[in-house]
């Protein structure tokens, strides 16, 4: 038995991947064709007066499916005998085939478990080839039907639509990267896309352009809905007049629903200014309807304005491109000045203008492309021009989005880069505000002193906690010298407390300085902080730390010593004995060194020893030496006596 080498195995796996991608493309096309055929068959079966057989239904379904890809159809049976073109593509039907081709290419380009990743170019070519095989079969089937495909449109735009959807699927499978470009692309573009900055700006421009096109579509749909609401009676008459049975009305309803995106684009072109054509001699714009329109009897066409000059309500349609330009500006400004990024990372004015112009150009290109497929000829007479004119709608979208979007982007960028100090201030005078340097110098001195003694730091913490608990929010309100700026009032700065008092009619108290005056620390009350003028003083400073200040109470005075000694006695639980004072002691009570040592107590008498035959009973312990008792200091007259 011959064993295959690694190279042969790799070639075999590659062939299997390409075959799988080819099958995926064919299956995607078959799903779209089959679903549309089922829908057409349901309408044909429910019709009480079918005039064609099953073969004609299949051919008509194949022709409609090709029309959904952009192919032009020809209707040979006309009253004049001249074949009439049908080139208006129902855009809602386009979504199905495009999504199926996109998904097939995405699944083919994604790697599977246990198998190597297929080539992106191979997956794209295989999926496109498989899909176009089904397209060729459908075109051959529809040639003998009532709606025959135009052979010139099978390459463009049908093949282009399929290839574009497949390329988008492969790009999605790769993670939607902005580069690198293929090797056959120009070197300048390859170098540009290799830069991260270029990719970031290009992505921002594409997002802003997509937002502008979306707002245009939404605004156009809103215009159509309002117009249909005003002419609801005419729309109902057109709907009921086209078909008398329920199956025919259902078919008309499906056709109208598939043309809703087209109507939205017509409304967008109307709001942009160029409007749309209603035949060779009529154009509808916000200024009015000129000429004699050739309007078929169809429900959606009831939204067409009346003939004559436009009114103020028609001019309100110009708000649609304004909204689109503001959407482009908003999305561009969000990327130019992010809210969570520092000011240094914001784009410059030149970069912001460039990205806004690129977004406006992208919005114009998208509008021109969509309006080009939203209309099309429906005959050879007056209806050979029907719908928006793309070479007018595109430049109009560029003018609106660039003329309004670029200045709006710069204004929004300035707004997002504003700082809390950007305002006309109505604060306290500068002289009332304590100097930052003096405050920092005082805080540094107090911090250095506090670190010298650990016991003093503990006492300062307890004192600061007591002051904070007593004062609470009142002390903080007195310390804060400004008010936070509100988002709805950007013209307001940070107003001080004295400024508010002045506006309220009262006199503003001068701001207290947090710098202590020399020589005032000994006169401060016990428990006060060095440099603190009032409760909560200094809390408005940026580097304020209440635990870094020393208390001003004297540590070695007699009163404080006695208080600490009494506290230790109470906390000992009676284990510490009372020391009686000796009034005969001539020592100087003013000496702090002598006060630091308490009197030595007399030794108590010892217990009696055990009885024995040779010795007497145990005697008492000897008393303290006389010279030690004589050396004790005299008692302080202000010191309280022993506890009874």
Image (cartoon, rainbow, N blue to C red):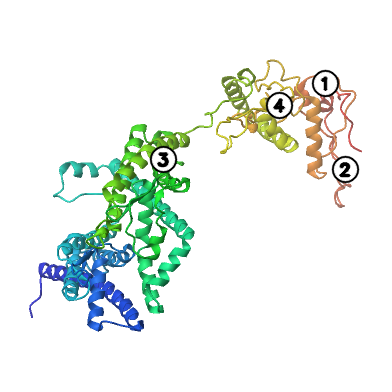
Is 70 left, or right, of 541 in this rendering?
A: left
Q: Foreground: 357 or 179?
A: 357
Looking at the rendered image, the disc whose residue lies closer to the viewer, 1 or 2, is 1
Query: Which of the two discs, 1 and 2, labels the residue nearer the N terminus?
Result: 1
Vertically, is 62 above or below 292? below
Specify the label residue 501 is tagged with. 4
**Under tag 1, what secondary structure?**
loop
Please tell me which residue is depicted at 44% across the width and 64% down the height of the picture.
234
Q: Answer whether labels 1 and 2 touch (C-beta < 8 Å).
A: no
In the rendered image, is residue 176 in sight? no
Looking at the rendered image, the disc whose residue lies closer to the viewer, 4 or 1, is 4
Query: Which of the two discs, 3 and 1, labels the residue nearer the N terminus?
Result: 3
**Under tag 3, what secondary structure?**
helix
**Mark pair 4, 2: CA separation:** 84 Å
Residue tagged by mark 2? 619
Q: Foreground: 438 or 113?
A: 113
Q: Residues within 10 Å of mark 2 (few under 14, many from 20)?
A: few
Residue tagged by mark 1? 589
């Amino acid at each position: 038995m011959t064993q295959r080498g690694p190279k042969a195995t790799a070639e075999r796996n590659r062939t299997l991947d390409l075959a799988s991608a080819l099958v995926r493309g064919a299956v995607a096309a078959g799903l779209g064709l089959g679903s549309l055929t089922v829908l057409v068959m349901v309408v044909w079966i429910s019709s009480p007066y079918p005039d064609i057989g099953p073969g004609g239904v299949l051919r008509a379904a194949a022709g409609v499916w090709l029309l959904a890809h952009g192919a032009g159809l020809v209707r040979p049976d006309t009253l004049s005998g001249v074949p009439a073109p049908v080139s208006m593509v129902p855009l809602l039907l386009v979504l199905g085939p495009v999504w199926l081709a996109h998904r097939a290419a995405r699944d083919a380009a994604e790697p599977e478990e246990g198998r190597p990743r297929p080539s992106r170019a191979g997956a794209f070519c295989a999926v496109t080839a498989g899909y176009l095989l089904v397209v060729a079969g459908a075109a051959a089937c529809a040639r003998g039907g009532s709606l025959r495909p135009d052979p010139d449109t099978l390459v463009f735009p049908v093949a282009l639509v399929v290839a574009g959807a497949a390329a988008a699927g492969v790009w999605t499978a790769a993670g939607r990267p902005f580069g690198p470009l293929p090797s056959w692309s120009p070197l300048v573009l390859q170098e540009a896309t290799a830069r991260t900055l270029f990719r970031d700006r290009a992505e921002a421009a594409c997002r802003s352009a997509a937002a502008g096109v979306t707002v245009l579509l939404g605004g156009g749909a809103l215009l159509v809905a309002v117009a249909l609401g005003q002419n609801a009676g005419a729309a109902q008459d057109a709907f009921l007049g086209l078909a008398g049975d329920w199956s025919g009305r259902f078919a008309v309803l499906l056709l109208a629903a598939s043309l809703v995106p087209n109507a939205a684009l017509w409304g967008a072109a109307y709001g942009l200014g160029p409007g749309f054509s209603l035949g060779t001699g009529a154009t509808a714009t916000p200024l009015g309807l000129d000429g004699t329109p050739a309007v078929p009897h169809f429900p959606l066409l009831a939204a067409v304005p009346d003939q004559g000059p436009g009114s103020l309500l028609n001019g309100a349609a110009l708000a649609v491109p304004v909204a689109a330009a503001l959407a482009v500006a908003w999305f561009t400004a969000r990327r130019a000045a992010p809210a969570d990024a520092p000011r240094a990372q914001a784009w410059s004015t030149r970069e912001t203008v460039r990205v806004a112009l690129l977004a406006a150009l992208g919005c114009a290109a998208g509008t021109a492309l969509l309006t080009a497929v939203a209309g099309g000829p429906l005959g050879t007479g007056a209806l050979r021009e029907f719908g928006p004119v793309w070479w007018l709608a595109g430049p109009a979208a560029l003018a609106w989005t660039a003329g309004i979007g670029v200045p709006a982007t710069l204004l929004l960028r300035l707004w997002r880069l504003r700082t809390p100090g950007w305002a006309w201030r109505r604060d306290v005078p500068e002289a009332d505000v304590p100097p930052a340097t003096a405050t920092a110098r005082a805080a540094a001195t107090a911090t250095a002193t506090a670190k010298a003694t650990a016991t003093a730091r503990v006492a300062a913490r307890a004192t600061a906690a007591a002051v904070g608990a007593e004062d609470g929010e009142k002390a903080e309100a007195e310390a804060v010298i400004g008010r936070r700026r509100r988002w709805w009032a950007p013209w307001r700065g940070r107003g001080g407390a004295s400024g508010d008092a002045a506006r309220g009619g009262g006199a503003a108290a001068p701001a207290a300085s947090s710098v202590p005056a020399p020589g005032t620390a000994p006169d401060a009350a016990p428990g006060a902080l060095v440099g603190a003028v009032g409760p909560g003083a200094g809390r408005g400073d940026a580097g304020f730390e209440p635990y870094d200040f020393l208390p001003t109470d004297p540590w070695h005075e007699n009163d404080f010593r006695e208080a600490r000694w009494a506290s230790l006695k109470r906390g000992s639980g009676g284990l510490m004995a009372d020391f009686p004072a000796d009034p005969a002691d001539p020592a100087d009570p003013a000496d702090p060194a002598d006060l630091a040592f308490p009197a030595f107590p007399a030794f108590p008498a010892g217990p009696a020893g055990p009885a024995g035959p040779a010795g007497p009973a145990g005697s008492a312990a000897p008393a303290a030496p006389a010279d030690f008792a004589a050396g004790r200091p005299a008692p302080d007259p202000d010191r309280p006596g022993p506890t009874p």
